[in-house]
Image (cartoon, helix red, strand yellow):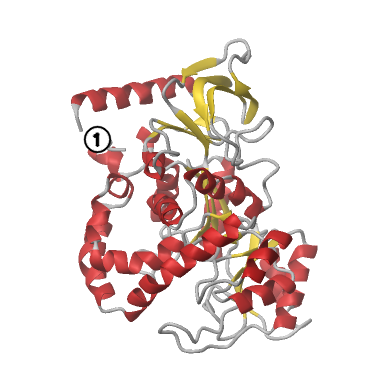
Amino acid sequence: MTQFRAQALLGALFFAASLQAQSSFAIENVTLIDGTGRPAMANACVIVSGEKILKAGPCPIAAPAGAGRIDGKGKFLIPGLMDVHIHLKGGRGPFGDQPPDETAGIRRLQGYLYAGVTTVLDVGNNPGFIFKLRDMERSGKIVSTRLLACGGIVTYPGGHGASQYATLVDSWPQAIPIIDAAIARKPDMLKLTYDEHGWGTRPRITLLPIDLMTQVIQHYNENGIRTTAHISSETRALEAIFAGVDTLAHPVIQGPVSDNFVRLMKAKQIPEASTLAIGENYSRLAEHPEYLDQPLYRDTLEPDEIARLQTTESAKQKENRWAWWMKVMTPVAQDNIRKVNAGGGIMALGTDTSEGAAVHRELELITAGGVSPLDAIRIATLNGARFLGRERDLGSIEEGKIADLVLLDANPLDDINNAKRIHMVVKSGSIIDRGKLDLPVNRRGTHSN
């Protein structure tokens, strides 16, 4: 990194730190991309007071007395990014079968913040691990992206994702006591799995019966909890929708969606997570492990993890038939996402991974599939809030909403990769000191964003 960039970054960090004690501040003369899909607004002002956005619109706007001021000239302001489908690293220990590793989980949560991701939804994890971290985030004990969590999934015995952390149901009303025990942990959403496999390289498995799925969804909804369903085909997506599910955890990937499905997604307004990065990453790791040398990965992933991925895991994926199947199917999923978005449905950004850098890869894949950068930002912000049922208070830069903001040094509408050019991150009205996060970039003392 050049001396000029180092000095500029240190100056930005010092300025951010000086504003952290302020109860209100104004970002002035910025180009505003508010997350709603409306065109960008030049020379905009955004006033933050406490954790909320007080005003957002053309400059000038009067700021409260004593408010800090940030000159946004030449910069671009977007809402905090969201990932509505993660599985946070650490729930099963460092090697998948060990006691939970809270340090690894916290570092990944801080990696999301560093990458401009201010809200994530974990859709399946060790409940004790993920709910403890959620409570730590909400109480302010850790600096973290906003963490919402499902805990363990619900599925049929032998179904997709059936594990020691899943709630297995096979009859109703006999399942009510174990379902109520899961609800008592106050999950933010229910994750069901509804996929019999039998495609790609996966053999068939048992499938959750529709009538049982309907009962479970209704019970969770009656307890005020939204639901999402893992699906991979149009048929299973339709059945889950008409069973009452609130969202879909993946796009249709087994084949091209029909025109009828696109029209139904517009009519129903069922949010659907994109999750392109997980499938595409298998072959990417096999063919181009050098992608992990990009600054955002080096800044947020531990060096030993990158070394393992570039050697052992890359070699493994070269021999993995699933990696090559998913390479073929990813363009199909990209087309389906483009069709649903263009048809008026609600796509929301999800990665099915555990790293903030993957959110930016997801944005690349979404736009590479034919979605405009403006729509991609809406997919990653306001549509994520709609997926969570939080569009009234999150997801866009509008008066009265929680102030989750990312200030960029370059225009993401020109190139979605400019969303990586992060100048400042704000979560709940507080400016994040990215230089104090427990990440490799800060331990080595050089920033390369």
| Residue 419 placement, left or right of 294 | right
Q: Is residue 170 above or below residue 306?
A: below
Helix, strand or loop at mark 1: loop
Q: Position of residue 332 (x, y in %)?
A: 46, 69
Residue depicted at x 38% and y 32%: 410
Nearer to the camera, 343 or 55: 343
Q: Is residue 16 above or below residue 126?
A: above
Residue depicted at x 27% and y 37%: 448
Mark 1: few/some/many CA within 10 Å (<14, 14-19, 20+): few
Q: Position of residue 337 (x, y in %)?
A: 53, 61
Q: Which residue is mark 1?
A: 445
Residue 22 can be seen, yes or no = no
Query: What number of labels is visible?
Result: 1
Q: Quadrant of residue 177?
A: bottom right
Q: Position of residue 83 (x, y in %)?
A: 51, 53
Q: Amino acid at mark 1?
A: Gly
| Residue 17 placement, left or right of 85 | left
Q: Is residue 148 above or below residue 154?
A: above
Q: Quadrant of residue 299?
A: top left
Residue 380 can be seen, yes or no = yes
Q: Quadrant of the C terminus?
A: top left
| Residue 178 placement, left or right of 73 | right
